Image: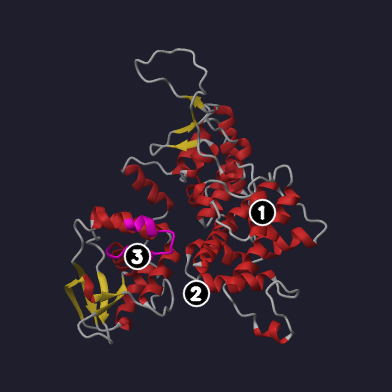
Amino acid sequence: MQTQKKELETGLLSVDLGNFRIGDQETTRDAYHAMILEEGEDIANLADDIIKLGLSPAELFIVCPDPDKKGHFVVCEGNRRMTAIRLLENPALASGTSVHSRFVALAKQYAIKPLKRVSCVVMDDKESAFVWIERKHRDLGGRGVAQWGATATGRADAFRGKIRASRAVLDHLRARRLLPGTLEASLSRQTTNLDRVFQMPYLASALGVKIEKDGAITYGNGDQKRGDDLLLRMVKHMAVAGFTVDKIRHLSDRKDFIDEFVDHAVLAEPTEEPPPIGAARHKTTRTTKTKRRAASPLERTTLALRGREFTLVISEPRLNALYEEALHLNPDNLPNSAAILTRVFLELSTDHYLTKAKAPLPKGHADKGRRYWSDMGISLKEKISVALKLLDPTGNDPSLKEARKALSTSDALHSVEALHDFIHHIKSDPDPKEVKRIWARWHPYLSLLFDTLQTLKR
């Protein structure tokens, strides 16, 4: 096995189209998008770290000669870093993804002092590199890199003056004699999950609970008893035997979990803004401005998401009328109407898009004499599946993750099967908060669909 350390120009390096993290890809752009889909905001965080600290001197790229380009190399180990560098060099490569705008901003900082060369270990081929790649990413009984456990991580955080969120919450409850031994024993196996939830900034905006880096816990409205009760409810929920990381694996899952406790929130009440220093405190008939907290999506009183950033531009009259109703219908008062409207609006919007995009009917349906996407016998799942392939041919757009999930599992809250039940099952009992969540999860799909329809008109 030949190895050689070299400083190589970044322009001579290419990502591995078959790297193990993202699987086989057709093109380098597909590989970048697949990495973004896999990593989400983490890839932008890595790019930010590279700008601030540079590349880690403890981790060199492992590369091998590119068989298709003489003098060029394929990155066998370090594809996350290589992708981050490429997106910093050219943020347009992230166009259409959730991190595009962030890379546009980061690229301006990176351009001040870009990386020209990087330290690499050159090996004969990927097979030669595999032995070291495996030791970096797999547990081989101590033969490779060993990640810190929860305890070691806590010690490292303490060294830097930071207390883990899980430790802060448990210490807080323990100090107030609210943590029975049996509950604490159950939670000792859940510290990582506790961190996933309690370290989220969303906790403060949605529930009013703020956990400082030094472990201090404060409640927005100052109600200590109610705040402690809220924390206790949350940790008890996470202590039950069936609670696993799968329930909070993704950001949207963790937000949904936090939203389950909004009825027990300890948010600060809106307060009046004080007048400018030196200004006279005269009585006035003008409306006093107030500081308002950011509302949780579940606190909205409409089915459709409101706000300029969520507005759907719809030209088709019937769909626009339905959308207007969704912008005014309150699911808290009319949950069944909201659920049915969601299902109807989703299907009619998809039918309209497929028709305008001139998407051919699947052969099986055409052979049965069906001519239009609205014909009986074509399932909603089939329609959305075809629409997704047109909207996102590579299947890598992170904004469509929830739409793809709705097709792949019947367990998802917003699955096509769940929407089907709203209309066809007499026992269906829609919950207002769940209906709001369902619309929110389908919103990115609807937004891209109607944006695309606007381009088709041109």
Mark 2: amino acid: Pro
Whether pointer 3 and pointer 2 mark residues with C-beta atoms closer than 8 Å, the reply is no
Q: How dense is the environment of label 1, judged by Cα within 10 Å: few (below 14), some, or many (20 and up)?
A: few
Residue 242 visible to an observer of this rendering: no
Position of 362 relative to 308 (above/below): below
Mark 3: amino acid: Ala
The spot of residue 52 in percent (x, y) is 25, 52
In which image quadrant can residue 104 be found?
bottom left
Furthest-right residue in this view: 426
Number of callouts: 3
Secondary element under disc 1, as helix, strand or loop, is helix
Left/right placement of residue 220 relative to residue 135 reads right
Left/right placement of residue 67 relative to residue 188 reads left
C-alpha span from label 3 to label 1? 36 Å
Q: Was residue 103 drawn as part of the magenta stretch in this picture?
A: yes
- Identify the magenta region: 89-104
**Point 47% across, 69% down: residue:** 396
C-alpha span from label 1 to label 2? 30 Å
Judge depth for marks 1 and 2 and give the one in front.
1
In which image quadrant can residue 410 be found?
bottom right
Mark 1: amino acid: Ala
**Point 64% across, 61% down: residue:** 412
The mark nearer the N terminus, 3 or 2, is 3
Residue behind mark 3: 92
| Magenta stretch, main secondary structure class | helix
The quarter of the rendered structure image containing the N terminus is: bottom left
Q: Nearer the viewer, residue 303 or 266?
A: 303
Q: Was residue 371 drawn as part of the magenta stretch in this picture?
A: no
Residue behind mark 1: 321
The spot of residue 328 in percent (x, y) is 66, 45
